[in-house]
Image: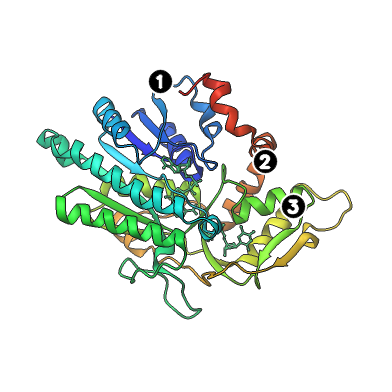
Amino acid sequence: MSILVTGGAGFIGANFVLDWLAQSDEPVVTLDKLTYAGNLENLASLQGDARHSFVQGDIGDRALLDRLLAEHRPRAVLHFAAESHVDRSIHGPEDFIQTNVLGSFRLLEAVRAFWSVLPEAEKTAFRFLHVSTDEVYGSLSPSDPAFAETNRYEPNSPYSASKAASDHLVRAWHHTYGLPVLTTNCSNNYGPYHFPEKLIPLMIVNALAGKPLPVYGDGMQIRDWLYVRDHCSAIRRVLQAGRLGETYNVGGWNEKPNIDIVNTVCALLDELRPRADGQSYRTQITYVKDRPGHDRRYAIDARKLEAELGWKPAETFETGIRKTVAWYLDNAAWVARVQSGAYRDWVATQYGATP
Ligand code: NAD
Ligand code: TYD
């Protein structure tokens, strides 16, 4: 038995693959296009591990998908691959439609073709787990209750609209074709291997580099933060015991305004790596022009996942953010290679030609 993970060289996918193989010997096939966000170095510790194989390719490549599915016969597909950065989606939405909508459609079709001719027992056991976001639900006012699975879809950015579209496709492939799907909608993740264009890693690396810490608008937008490895444990739990066709919201009841997040990162850096001049990293905070259409507040109601499947996060925000800041301090070489672009040479350096 094995599982196929799409997008496994990205932030959450890499954490998922590493955690999976730390807990189980069930092999993993990672399919990743290695866009700017894909960093095979994230999986470097698996080099030479017979339980892991990596394939560079696009989820939109039907011939490749057919070949991979026939060759590896996975018992589950975990679909992480996506264009994931809201700011990039505002500047160039096309890639988001290509990968998140069309790519997910191609993947669903390939998986359906593979699944529909499986022997009955394998067919019954098979799962397609779609990893999605809370951003599909739109924005909350300060007094609104947190997003439940029954909330209306009201995506506001090209990113969230493309993810919403993929969620709808997944739902339809279950209702129309009986494909055994599960969907998770998670809040903002943070932790190791997070690409430093997103809020938390950007603040850490800019602070250390003596650069401004750009806070959009008034910094009072609220996100609900979850440590990435807790997201991974939720996905494993949903894969194991989730009800077919259901969606599960994943979150840790950790709503915080952005400015609080930035202040916390600064305070941890002041403690762990004080500035040479004795000043706080807070002095680097700079308020900048707001993101167009910026959602004001996200919050996840994760009671369904807890009540049905008994999942709870292991980290509090305080423990998770301390681990995260420490990881970035301990992994300066990873950061440097991401910043210089050298991480993109990793495939050629490690594998010669295309693996
Ligand atoms: P990421 O951008 O770090 O990684 C995405 C990965 O997908 C990269 O390795 C990239 O190379 C790969 N990829 C992109 N297009 C591809 C294609 N066409 N074919 C194959 N591979 C492709 O993203 P992430 O933060 O790890 O997010 C993973 C998933 O989780 C996404 O579906 C995202 O919508 C969802 N999600 C993210 C968050 C978050 O806070 N980061 C929260 C909830 C849900
Ligand atoms: P981000 O990490 O891009 O995640 P998302 O937009 O998917 O929630 O941003 C998190 C929040 O931080 C969001 O409200 C935008 C804000 N933000 C800043 O204030 N400054 C920044 O430089 C970035 C990247 C984000």
User: Furthest residue to the right?
Assistant: 277
- N-terminal of the pair, mark 3 or mark 1, is 1
Residue 315: give x, y in percent of width and height: 52, 52
The amino acid type of the residue labelled 1 equals Ala
| Distance between mark 3 and mark 1 Cα atoms | 39 Å
**Residue 73 in the image: above or below residue 221:** above
Which label sits on residue 339? 2
Which x, y percent locates residue 312?
41, 55
Q: Are marks 1 and 2 in contact (CB under 8 Å)?
A: no
Disc 3 and disc 2: Cα gap in Å?
14 Å
Which quadrant of the figure shows ligand 2?
bottom right
Residue at left 53%, top 26%? 347
Q: Say what amino acid the circle numbered 3 marks.
A: Ala
At horizontal 68% and vertical 56% (from top left) the residue drawn is 265
Q: Which circle's residue, 3 or 2, is located before the other in the chain? A: 3
Q: Mark 1 highlights which residue?
A: 50
Residue that label 3 marks? 207
Question: Is 323 placed above or below 249 here?
Answer: above
Expressed as whole percent of the image width and height from the top left, the position of residue 203 reads 68, 54
Judged left or right of residue 154, residue 74 is left
Q: Quadrant of the N terminus?
A: top left
Of badges 1 and 2, nearer the viewer stands 2
How many C-alpha atoms fall within 10 Å of the one at disc 2: few (<14), some, or many (≥20)?
few
Q: Residue at x 40, y 62 (%)?
A: 161
Which residue is nearer to you in this view: 81 or 262? 81
**Could you tell me if the residues under marks 3 and 2 are in contact, i.e. CB atoms within 8 Å?**
no
For the question of whether residue 2 can be seen, the reply is no
At label 3, counting other C-alpha atoms closer than 10 Å, the crowd grade (few under 14, some 14-19, many 20 or more) is many
Q: Secondary structure at mark 1?
A: loop
Q: Is residue 183 above or below residue 328?
A: below
The answer to whether residue 39 is left or right of residue 23 is right
